[in-house]
């Protein structure tokens, strides 16, 4: 569509030949992106992707948050190690925010703010139990902020459910084009412009696993999920297998997070800790949650007679979606 395309930072797209950006720089810092933007002299409009390494592990050491004052989610185990890791994570989020600010400042100095659609989002939840590698809200519900002066009302919010696949057709439409047929996503421009309050009736999510990271750190917990505005249903494809990840298996090196070992130790004498450790590593075949009453998905309603109709409906919808994706269980065992 006549755009200059540039990508800076983390680059997990493969094969690279299928992502023909004009410029690719995989530096851990965002300074190259700032320099590129500050010095951009092309006559083409610009499509710029900046992927910050923070707040991926390893997190920087906390220097500004008080571990004693932070609030932990109810499905966490409160230990000194948890609070220390949490403040390190917050510090890394703050570092990411500083990086982002540098890019926005460069755009402002180039007078690009007024005619630019800016989108901030992330690919998944953070490296915490029940988040990354999981299909709960903490793993799949990610930040999404969009700004476009004169088109998006500042400070406006929406409850519309979207999917990351919707970003591509949205960008195509924003650039004046028409998205090709057959894409999984569809443009959310009407939501951004305040023309529609709803976008998707439900969203789907998956996790299969990977074997990277060395012995003990590979994760294997294949799961599929459907989420509506009020409920989430999860199908765990291999519930017999104990769930292991970098969190449970990594014991040394820069990606080691001490909080998990402290959870296991506390579980020897504390009922809540024991329940959280067990819930993380052992999943039933089906899970159903009322997200309005139980936003942290701690009370599994699957098997309760009063929720049988909701369970069957969501099970059928997820099964239909999986068939449309050629998603066969035997491939993941």
Image: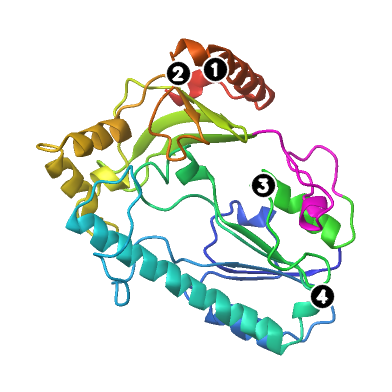
Q: Is residue 155 left or right of residue 58?
A: right
Sequence-wise, which precedes: disc 1 or disc 3?
Answer: 3
Res 63 quadrant in image: bottom left
Does residue 49 sit above or below 163 in this rendering?
A: below
Q: SS class of the residue under badge 1?
A: helix
How far apart are the two marked residues, 1 and 2, measured between alpha carbons?
7 Å
Sequence-wise, which precedes: disc 4 or disc 3?
Answer: 4
Q: Which mark is residue 159?
A: 3
How far apart are the two marked residues, 4 and 1, measured between alpha carbons?
46 Å
Is residue 183 in the magenta section? Answer: yes
Q: Is mark 4 in CB contact (under 8 Å) with mark 3? A: no
* Number of residues whose C-alpha sits closer than 10 Å to that of mark 2, classed few (under 14), some (14–19) or many (20 or more): many
Does residue 25 sit above or below 178 in this rendering?
A: below
Which one is in front in this view, the residue at disc 4 or the one at disc 1? 1
Query: Does residue 28 appear in the picture of this structure?
Result: no
| Residue beneath the point at 29% across and 44% down | 217
Which residue position is annotated with label 1?
311
Which residue position is annotated with label 4?
115
How far apart are the two marked residues, 1 and 3, measured between alpha carbons?
23 Å
Q: Which residues are magenta?
A: 179-202
How far apart are the two marked residues, 4 and 3, measured between alpha carbons?
26 Å
The main secondary structure of the magenta stretch is loop
Is residue 93 in the magenta section? Answer: no
Which one is in front in this view, the residue at disc 1 or the one at disc 3? 3
Q: Is mark 1 in CB contact (under 8 Å) with mark 2? A: yes
Q: Nearer the viewer, residue 53 or 297?
A: 297
Q: Nearer the viewer, residue 13 or 288?
A: 288
| Residue beneath the point at 31% across and 24% down | 241
* Number of residues whose C-alpha sits closer than 10 Å to that of mark 1, classed few (under 14), some (14–19) or many (20 or more): many
Sequence-wise, which precedes: disc 4 or disc 2?
Answer: 4
């Amino acid at each position: 569509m006549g755009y200059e395309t540039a990508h800076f930072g983390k680059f997990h797209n493969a094969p690279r030949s299928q992502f023909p950006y004009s410029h690719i720089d995989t530096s851990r810092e965002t300074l190259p992106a700032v320099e590129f933007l500050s010095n951009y002299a092309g006559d083409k409009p610009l499509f710029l992707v900046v992927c910050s390494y923070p707040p991926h592990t390893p997190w920087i050491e906390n220097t500004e948050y008080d571990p004693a004052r932070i609030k932990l989610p109810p499905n966490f185990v409160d230990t000194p190690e948890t609070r220390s890791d949490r403040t390190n994570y917050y510090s890394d989020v703050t570092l990411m925010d500083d990086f982002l600010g540098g890019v926005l400042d460069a755009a402002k100095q180039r007078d690009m703010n007024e005619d630019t659609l800016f989108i901030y989002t992330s690919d998944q939840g953070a490296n915490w139990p029940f988040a990354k590698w999981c299909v709960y809200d903490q793993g799949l519900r990610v930040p999404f902020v969009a700004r476009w002066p004169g088109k998006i009302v500042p400070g406006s919010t929406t409850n519309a459910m979207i999917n990351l696949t919707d970003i591509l057709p949205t960008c195509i439409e924003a650039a004046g084009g028409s998205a090709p047929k057959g894409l999984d996503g569809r443009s959310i421009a009407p939501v951004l412009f305040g023309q529609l309050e709803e976008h998707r009736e439900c969203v789907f999510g998956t996790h299969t696993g990977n074997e990277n990271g060395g012995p003990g750190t590979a994760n294997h917990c294949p799961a599929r999920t459907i989420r509506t505005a009020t409920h989430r249903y999860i199908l765990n494809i291999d519930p017999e297998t104990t769930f292991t990840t970098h969190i449970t298996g990594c014991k040394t090196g820069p990606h080691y997070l001490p909080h998990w070992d402290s959870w296991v130790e506390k579980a020897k004498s504390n009922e809540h800790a024991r329940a959280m450790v067990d819930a993380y590593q052992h999943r039933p075949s089906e899970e159903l949650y009322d997200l309005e009453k139980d936003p942290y998905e701690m009370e599994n309603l699957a098997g309760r007679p009063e929720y049988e109709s909701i369970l069957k409906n969501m099970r059928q919808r997820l099964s239909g979606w999986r068939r449309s994706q050629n998603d066969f269980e035997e491939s993941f065992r």
